[in-house]
Amino acid sequence: MSTHADSKPWTVPALADAKREGRKLVMLTAYDNSFARVMDANGVDLVLIGDSLGMVVQGHDSTLPVTVDDIAYHTRVVARGLTRALLVSDLPFQSDATPERALDAATALLQAGAEMVKLEGAGHKLDVIRFLVERDIPVCAHLGLTPQSVLKFGGYRVQGRGEAAAAQLRDDARAVAEAGAQMLVLECVPSSLAAAITADIAIPTIGIGAGPGCDGQVLVLHDFLGLDTGHRRPKFVKDFLADGGSVAGAVRAYADAVRSGAFPDDAHSY
Ligand code: KIV
């Protein structure tokens, strides 16, 4: 199976090359330097400073309390542990409410060591994506179950079910790609829809609860290690520590399973 050369650092343009060449992208969230180093040394291509840190590190019930300073802090400590993986950092709740606010937040995160920022949604966020990309800030979009919209959704539920919702999601995916996003995270959507979106657009899709048809996969660190975070375990979560025997082994088992297409299987998809 073809992979990115072990010693070669990832770049944003290389993500589209991977999709064209059919190489799966392996992504995990990290929040500290030691885990970042293990991931970097064991085949992870992309590390995400997710605002999930609000739930798995800070003990909140949602990602809404997370601030730009929180993400910048974790970005700085993780960046010092990476030599090869590309570092993506979340724009937290409402830090991307306007293009100008998003530019300030994204600048702070890039100065802390991020190489790409991730933001949730389409709609008015399309202007934000365009504004950032025109100013040389690489953007990863995030559609489907966007956790910052939990109050609007009324909980953490699978999105894109039914014809109208699926068509809207396909339109949104095309729109974020046209606005200039260079990658798209699809969270909690039916596998068939995620596969159709992946075929529709030239930028790589990274699935989490979105089935095996995406161009790559991401999991939250604590979920992938089988830790009890005090939150309900979604169906797509798999404990790779049980398979891998050690943290490094778990990372390798996950990377191999993503690259071979063994993860996610039907039992971990919608
Ligand atoms: O915050 C996060 O960890 C994320 C992933 C779930 C994709 O956005």
Image (tube, rainbow, N blue to C red):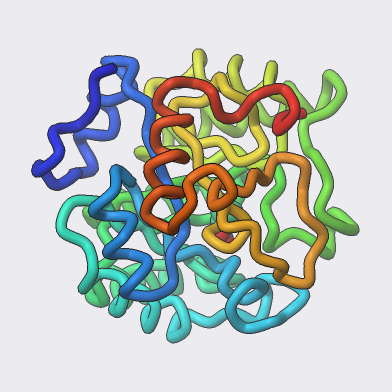
Residue 209 visible? The answer is yes
Task: Indicate the position of residue 256 as horizontal and vertical percent values.
Answer: 40, 31
The number of callouts visible is: 0
Q: Residue furthest left?
A: 7
Task: Indicate the position of residue 98 as horizontal and vertical percent values.
Answer: 51, 66
User: Where, by quadrant of the figure, is residue 93 drawn?
Assistant: bottom right
Q: Quadrant of ligand 1?
A: bottom right
User: Where, by quadrant of the figure, is residue 173 drawn?
Assistant: top right
Q: Say above or below: 77 vs 121.
A: below
Q: Quadrant of the C terminus?
A: top right
- In the rendered structure, the answer to whether residue 112 lies left or right of residue 249 reads left
The residue depicted at 74 percent of the width and 59 percent of the height is 149
The residue depicted at 65 percent of the width and 24 percent of the height is 265
- In the rendered structure, the answer to whether residue 161 lies left or right of residue 134 reads right
Q: Residue furthest front?
A: 245
The residue depicted at 20 percent of the width and 36 percent of the height is 13
Q: Relative to the observer, which residue lies in front, 241 or 101?
A: 241
Task: Indicate the position of residue 37 as horizontal and vertical percent values.
Answer: 27, 64
Q: Quadrant of the N terminus?
A: top left
- In the rendered structure, the answer to whether residue 159 lies left or right of residue 20 reads right
Q: Relative to the observer, which residue lies in front, 79 or 225?
A: 225
The residue depicted at 37 percent of the width and 83 percent of the height is 73
